[in-house]
């Protein structure tokens, strides 16, 4: 499959320390760079606390050389905490997409957003809360028209230690499936930027 040409596309992954934000950024960035051949820069910032402090990972993706490595006008903002959503929404460009953790972001700053209960999905359907970030990776991969599911998943398998690959591939597939089921076609979402929020039913697969 031929890569879609990108002039510049910015992603901000944000939340709390302990949610796996930095790992999520590294896996996504390396998949798009090494797996698909895009130019990618990845920068990160985190609070003084190892767990619970504010954390973010930014990706800039382009088919061309990247002149400025930091994200300033974000196309996709992923906010996994209320604090992160409040702090970084101002950097989302008009027409960009906001993806939230719907149980932790109780007051989105805008009516147009997408949401999934990522933490509950990890707990109830995977059986491991720490797999939440990999569910997010699957959902984000679905939302990005230029991201190839098989390549991102393969990169995930190559990066993670062997003992946790199977459960994280399961989490990735779940995130992709839930996004596909609840969000509709990515191309249409980028045009309409409509509200879609899925409530977790607490069942298991």
Image (tube, grey):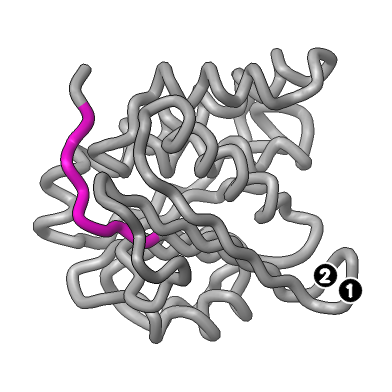
**Image position of 73 with respect to 57: above or below:** below
Q: Which mark is residue 7?
A: none
Residue 114 lies in quadrant: bottom left
Residue under the point 11% across and 59% down = 192
Q: Which mark is residue 49?
A: 1
Q: 66 or 36, which is in the foreground?
A: 66
Quadrant, the N terminus? top left
Main secondary structure of the magenta stretch: loop
Mark 2 — residue?
Answer: 52
Q: 37 or 15, which is in the foreground?
A: 37
Is 88 displayed left or right of 163 in the figure?
left
Instruction: Point out the stretch of residues depicted in magenta.
Output: 3-10
Is 161 displayed left or right of 8 in the figure?
right
The alpha-carbon separation of the residues under discs 2 and 1 comes to 6 Å
Q: Position of residue 85 (x, y in %)?
A: 52, 76
Residue under the point 66% across and 42% down = 132
Q: Residues within 10 Å of mark 2 (few under 14, many from 20)?
A: some
Residue 48 lies in quadrant: bottom right
Q: Position of residue 72 (x, y in %)?
A: 39, 78
Residue under the point 43% across and 20% down = 151
Quadrant, the C terminus? top right
Give the SS element for disc 1.
loop
Is 54 displayed left or right of 9 in the figure?
right
Point out the frontmost of discs 2 and 1: 1
Quick check: is 193 in the magenta stretch?
no
Tag count in the figure? 2
Q: Position of residue 98 (x, y in %)?
A: 37, 64
Q: Is residue 80 visible?
A: no
Q: Position of residue 188 (x, y in %)?
A: 11, 47
Q: 98 or 148, which is in the foreground?
A: 148
Q: Residues within 10 Å of mark 1 (few under 14, many from 20)?
A: few
**Image position of 30 with respect to 56: above or below:** above
């Amino acid at each position: 499959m031929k890569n879609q040409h990108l002039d510049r596309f910015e992603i901000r992954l944000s939340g709390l320390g302990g949610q796996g934000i930095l790992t999520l950024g590294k896996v996504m960035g390396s998949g798009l760079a090494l797996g698909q051949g895009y130019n990618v820069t990845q920068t990160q910032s985190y609070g003084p606390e190892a767990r619970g402090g504010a954390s973010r990972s930014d990706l800039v993706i382009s088919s061309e050389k990247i002149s400025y490595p930091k994200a300033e006008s974000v196309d996709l903002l992923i906010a996994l905490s209320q604090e992160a959503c409040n702090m970084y929404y101002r950097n989302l460009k008009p027409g960009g997409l906001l993806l939230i953790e719907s149980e932790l972001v109780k007051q989105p700053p805008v009516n147009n957003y997408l949401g999934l209960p990522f933490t509950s999905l990890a707990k109830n359907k995977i059986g491991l809360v720490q797999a939440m970030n990999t569910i997010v990776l699957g959902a984000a991969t679905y939302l990005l028209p230029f991201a190839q599911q098989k390549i991102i998943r393969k990169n995930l398998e190559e990066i993670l230690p062997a003992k946790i690959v199977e459960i994280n591939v399961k989490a990735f597939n779940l995130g992709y499936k839930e996004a596909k089921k609840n969000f509709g076609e990515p191309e249409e979402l980028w045009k309409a930027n409509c509200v879609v929020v899925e409530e977790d039913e607490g069942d298991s697969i």
